[in-house]
Amino acid sequence: MKDLSYIKQHIHIMLTEKRYQHSLGVQKTAVHLATLYDVPVEKARIAGLVHDCAKDLSVDQLLKHAAQFDIIMDDLTKYQPELLHGVVGAVLAKDLFDIEDIEIIDAIRYHTTGRSSMTKLDKIIYLADFIEPSRDFDGVDLLRKAALSDLDKATLLALEHTIRYVMNKGKLLHVDTIHARNSLLLRQDGLEQE
Ligand SMILES: [Fe+2]
Ligand SMILES: [Fe+2]
């Protein structure tokens, strides 16, 4: 893997200043959550910094990368290609920064949708994306508070926030987000093992 300063420098070039600051915020929040929930801090640091590396690519560029890396597009992604930034970000993380760690790659890949049986690192990046210091929306303080005391509960609240938001906008909901919520609810009831 390339060293942190190399990655940071390139992320800065790939993103708008605002998105770069967001990424630094996600990195910081992810590191904090990792220390709280006993997750390797370096994995959280890299995944947080890199998670949105494909977010400022145009739809054309996203589609080009998807073709180049043989990414299979589900129907929903064809309608909403911006959802690709997680998947494309994951392949770019490997391609540009030699990140091989599958947990880091998956946390980047699923940071927009979540997925069934999310790992602790998946949850940390998903949440950090929501609650990093520059985020400001109704309910963010509640989520910030929840994130400090219960990782599963906070992730569930964040997923439900997304689901409500997507529905209010009349947009399509990715099936992985439903799977993520269902799997956390089952886990809460002791019906799913980690
Ligand atoms: Fe993102
Ligand atoms: Fe983000």
Image (cartoon, rainbow, N blue to C red):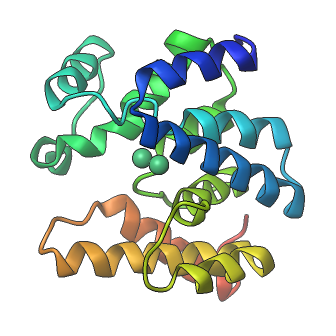
Residue with the most extreme front position: 17
Q: Which quadrant of the figure contains the N terminus?
A: top right
The location of residue 21, given as percent across then percent down, is 54, 42
Residue 173 appears in the picture as rendered: yes
Figure check: 150 above or below 8? below
Q: Position of residue 9 (x, y in %)?
A: 60, 17
Q: Is residue 187 visible?
A: no
Count of marks placed on residues: 0
Front-most of 11 and 122? 11
Q: Quadrant of the C terminus?
A: bottom right
Question: Foreground: 27 or 12?
Answer: 12
What residue is shown at x 42% (from left), y 29% (from top)?
A: 15
Placement of 157 over or under 118, stated as above or below: below
Q: What x and y, as percent, mark residue 174?
A: 28, 60
Eyeballing the image, is 121 above or below 94? Answer: below
Please give the name of the residue rendered at 88% of the width and 56% of the height, measured from the top-left corner: 35
* Relative to 127, 69 lies left or right: left
Q: Quadrant location of residue 33?
A: bottom right
Nearest the camera: 3 or 86?
Answer: 3
Residue at 41 percent across and 79 percent down: it is 161
Q: Residue at x 41, y 53 (%)?
A: 112
Residue 173 lies left or right of residue 123; in this view the side is left
Left or right: residue 45 compared with residue 87:
right
* Whole-percent x, y for residue 16 in the image: 39, 33
Q: Quadrant of residue 57?
A: top left
- 136 and 164: which one is in front? 136
